[in-house]
Every structure is written in structure tokens, then in C-alpha cells.
Image (tube, rainbow, N blue to C red):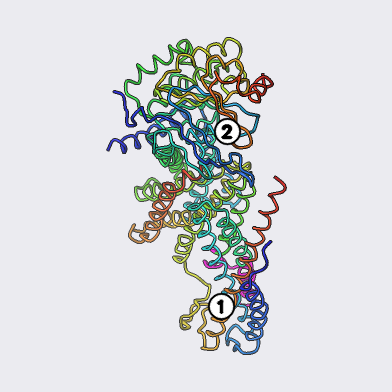
Amino acid sequence: MARMTFPPELLRIDVHGLVKRYHRHPVLNQLSLTINRGDFCLLVGDNGVGKTTLLRILAGLVRPSQGAVTLYGADGPSNPLVRREIGYVGHQPMVYQDLSAYENLLHSARLYPLENREARISQALQALGLVAHQHQPVRTLSRGLLQRLSLARATLHQPSILLFDEPYTSLDQEAAGFLDRFLQNWHRPDRIILLAAHRPQRLLTLASHVAWLKDGRIDVHIPVSALAESPELNSYLGEVT
Amino acid sequence: MPKKPVALVVLDLLSLILVPLAMLIIIVYTPVEVVMGPVQKVFYFHISAAWAGMVCFILGAVGGAGYLLTRRIRWDWLSSAAIEVGLVFSIIAIFSGMIWARPIWNTWWVWDPRLTTTAIMTLIYLAYFILRAGVSTPEAQARLGAVFAILAALTVPLTFFSIRLFRTIHPVVIAPADGTGGAFSMSPRMLNTLLLSLLVFTVLLVDLVWRRVRLAQLEFEMTREVE
Amino acid sequence: MKAIGAYLGVVWQILRKDIQVEWRGRQGLPVMLMFALMIVFLFNFALQLAPDVQAGLTSGLLWVSLAFASTLGLNRSISLERENNALDGLLLAPVDRSAIFFGKTLGNFCFTTLVGLLLLPVFSLFYGQNLLRAPLLLVILLGLAAYTSLGTLLSALSIQARTRDVLLPVLLYPLALPILIAAVEASRGVLAEQPLSEMSSWIYLLLAGVLIFNAAGLLFFETILED
């Protein structure tokens, strides 16, 4: 049974006047951004510019100092029900070392809570090639496998919005290729993907949009197809690869 | 830095005048207590300091609540300023209590409830500053400090009641003398002096907290250039 | 109704997960028990407690051991969530964040109570008193309910600081003092064969603690973690 408490047509990331302050000088300063249903948007910008902060705010993990974030018209990530539609893959895998992959997924499944848990978990393990390792304690898994477990955890509840924070970091060729294919499969007209990338060039074939975070704001936000018209962004993307 | 408001100037002057005036009154006008002798006069500032400390801590919790509700940093200035000033008043209360206790009960420290509560409160508010010092960002300092200040204020009545259930050798202030060690009754002059002392310390409290808030504001404005 | 079910489900799952991880060899429980026993031995030699020690000392010693051992457990419990940022996983769950508070508190409560229950026969053996009495159990349950809820709240606070592990005791002990006093006094009364009605004030105090700290958890836990 699909739990559609929010009408899918309303799905849209809407950020207005977002400010986040840790010290005197805000990290995010009057940031506005709109990402439509079906978009696969790359979030680019220098290290420390605030990509992680923005993603965590969208996931509901960080509270804005000012401004509005909505994901379904009037509702944003501070509404617990909206969080059901969010999947987040951060720098850390968010798992318990002493439990197995299977147990971690079961834990996650129970938090949502999900129906047909066994089936869903089986499916996820299969889709992400984790079946052979499902009963080992997580601390024995390699970085690549941990990444896959993260993906499984983030997508187990079939969210409509996927947020990624630099998922390609320290992945080898094979693992990166796997992630490429995963993203390609996941990208559908009724979903949103927002992915912060440090080296975005390789993803330009997969993504539909690029957003450039600079000086606390989104400086440029254009479809990939229109990149030629933005020489500054183009050269920036060339530099960081 | 905005110019000092007239009200603050007035408070400064009032404090400067009232404190020595009160001391003079205590020494000259107020009668000497029969049993304890002159050292009993420490009592007026001792109680007033304890009272001021208590008011400050409540102010600290109010400031904390204000910050959590509005997220405006001014409330954090109030909260941390009040707790800092309150800490000073509490320490004064403890030391004056010790000075009073020594000749009367022949010991520097009495494990009686009221003095002990004040000591505990002092520890709690020192912990407040240790917490703030251990946190990296001003935003977290304000937010976590606010929660702790509110929690701390909530435990004060618990502490008070838990201790009230103990027998106390700390004097019962306004009740008639009933022979339980250390109690004394207050003549009208003593009562007036006490009320005056409370008033003086309240003025002093407001003055100090206000000045400390201004200092916090100045520090805040200076960080603008550094970032 | 469904929302309440989901909420309770999260609380229960967090408790379950904590027990599962502990069972898998996290070593929290043995360490706590070991620590409590070490304290008993230490105090025994430091204070030269004779086998016929009074009921009052036994209850004090019991609660000191529990308080210290509990701190170990509280630290371990919250640092479990810190590894690999598992806490984010809990924060992402589609329920009010106070569910995390109640789940963790229940876990801490269960583990500390278990240590307490294991200590009772040990104490009975060492001090020739029968500690296996129902009223004492009640006091332990109430006291630990209040203590662990405050402890869980403060452990979430302290984990945000750089000085994480050492900060928790600094914050916890002064605030928990009224709870510990009440628990010791009530335990003392039970061991001295007094009827529970004699200790009603202490029991009420413990109940007040349970209420206040759980209410605080409900109100503030999300604020503490929101970053």
C-alpha cells in the first residue's frame, strides 16, 4: 500500500530567503532555489561553501536561522510526515558497526515503519549487490560496500526526494560506475535528485540541472543543456575536474 | 557602540550612592543583635546577595527561553550576562555566609541546607560556562546554554525542597525566636534594613546585568570585522 | 492513532536496537557493573566500613555507585549514535524527535536498573543486610527513572561539545543532586524498616523529578540536536 499523504504533483523543493548562521557571518545568506519534479540537479561549489549545510537543511537535520523550505507546497522537512519522502546519503553511512547489513536495514525499516519489510529488504540487498555480505557485521565492509548499504538504507522507503552529499568521495572506479548506474535508474519524472558533487564533470551526462553555490547563495541554476550559455560556470566546472 | 542610555547612567549613580549608604546604615543605624553580636550584620548583605543571585538565575532562564522562542541573539546576551552576574552574587553569598558562620557556629562551613543549596547552584552555573566553553559555535553556545539554563532553573525548587526536608541550622529569618539554634527575631529596624539591602542589591543587579549585556553586544559587533 | 503507533514504534525500536547492540558485545553492561563494584571496594577501604555498617551508609553507597556507573552507560549510549552518524538516521525518521529521547532514556534506564538489581545481593552479602525488598525496588526504579531521563538529556547536550565525555558528569551531578538525596533518604528509610508512608515526601520528590525531566526531554530534545 503506497502511503501518499502528499499529492505527488505538489512535489517541488522550494527554498526562499534561507539563512544559516553558526558564527556572525552566515554560511547561507538569503539563498533561494527551486527544484522541480523530475529534476536531477548537481550542486556544485567550493569546499566549505555550504553544500553540506544546504543538504542537511533540506533533509531536516539542520534548522535554518531564517527562511522557508517547503517540499510539498506548504510542508517542509520539519513536518515528520514529509521526512518519509526524503532519502539522505551523507558523508557517513549512518549504521551501527556491530550489527549486520541486514539488521541495520531492518532497524531502518522499523523506524518508518514499512510494510512487507522482509521483501523490501531482500529486494534492496539484491538490487545493491549486498546479498553475500548481508549477515556480516558492518565494520567488516569495505568503503564501496558501505556506500551501497547507505544507498539501500536511504532508498528502502521509496522516497521521492534523494539528497546526496558528495557520494563519490573515495570510491574506486567500479564503485563509482555502480553509483552512476544506480542514479540513472533512480532518476524518474516523479522524483527529485539533488547531488552535491566535488568533481561534477562525469555527472553532466546523467544530471538535468546544475546549481552553483557561491557566497551563501545559488549564483547560477541552469539546465545542463544550457551550460554553453554560462561561460563562468562552464569554466568553473572545467577547473574542478 | 551606542552612547550610554540615561537610565543606565542613573542606575550607575544610584548604585554608587546606595551601596555605601546601605553599609553606613547597617553599621550605624541598625541595632546589634543580642546573641550573635556585631557579626550578625553580615546577614543583611548575605541574604541580599543570595536573593540577587536567585533573581539573576531566573533571569538567565528567561533569557534562555527568549532565545529559544525568538532565536535572536540579544536574548542570549541577557541569559549569559545574568548568569555571570548571578554567579558573582552567589559566591558573595557563600563567602559572607562563611564569615557569619565562623564566630557563631565555630566552623567555616556548615552543611546546612541553604548554604549547601547556594553552593550547588554555584556549581551548576559554573558548569554552564564550562558547557559554553566546550562548544565551538556561538549559535550552539546560545542554544545549548539556553536549554541548560532553563533546566538548571527548574531543578532549583527541587533542590530547595529536598533540602528543606532536612533539619536546618541556618537561621529562620522572619519567624519569632523559638530556641532552635541560630534563629533570631528581627526588630522593626532590622527588618527595614533588610528591605533596604534587598532594594540596593536589586538596583545593583540590574545595573551590572545591563552593563554586561552591553559588553556582550560590543564583543558581538567586533567579531564582524574578524570573520 | 496511527501517528501514536508510529511514535511508540520508534521508541520501542530504539530500545530494541540498543539492547541488540549491547548483546552483540558492546561491553557497556559489564563495564558498568565492574565500575560499581570497584567503587564499593574503594569506599570500603577508604572509609573503613565495618561489616555491621549502618543502613544509612549502605543506601548512600548504593546510590553513589549507581550514579557513577550510570554515567559510563549514558556516555556509551550516546556515543553509539555518534559513530558513523547513526543519529542522523534516527533524526530522519518520520516521527517527532522526542521519540529518540524516550527510546534512549528507556535503554539507559533498563541497563542502569539491571546494574542496580545485580548490586543488591552483593550489598546484602557485604553488609549483612537484606536489600532484596520490594519498597527498595520501588525507590530504585523511581530514582533511576528520574536520573536516567535527566542523564539522557544532558548526554545529548554534552555530545555536542568538544569536551564530550568529561562534560557529562560536570553537568549531571549538580542537577541530579536533589534526586540522589531523595533516593538515598528514601532507601535509608526502607532499610531502617520504616513504612513507606514516612518517606512519602521523598517519593513525591522523585516523582516530581521523573515528571520534570521527561517533560524537559519532550520539550528540548529536538532543540538540543537540531544543530
Report the chain holding disc 2: A
Q: Amino acid at mark 2?
A: Ile
In-image side of C24 versus B21 (left or right): left
Magenta segment: does it hold B105? Answer: yes
Q: Nearer the viewer, mark 2 or mark 1?
A: 2
Residue A92: in sight, yes or no?
A: no
User: What is the distance, in whole Å, between disc 2 and disc 1 at their CAs?
Assistant: 56 Å
User: Badge 1 local density, few (<14 within 10 Å), some, or many (20+)?
Assistant: some
Rendered position, B194 above or below C66: below
The quarter in which the C terminus of chain A is drawn is top right
Viewer-proximal residue among B222 and B210: B222
Residue B45, by quadrant, is bottom right
Residue identified by numbered label 1: B199
- Residue at image position (52%, 82%) is B184
- Element carrying mark 1: helix
The quarter in which the N terminus of chain A is drawn is top left
Viewer-proximal residue among B130 and B165: B130
Which residues fall within the magenta stretch?
B91-117
Residue identified by numbered label 2: A218
Residue B227, by quadrant, is top right
Which residue is the extreme one toward the left?
A: C1
Q: x, y percentage for residue A162?
A: 47, 25
User: What label sits on residue C138 in the rendered view?
Assistant: none
Q: x, y percentage for residue C64?
A: 52, 49
Magenta segment: does it hold C20? Answer: no
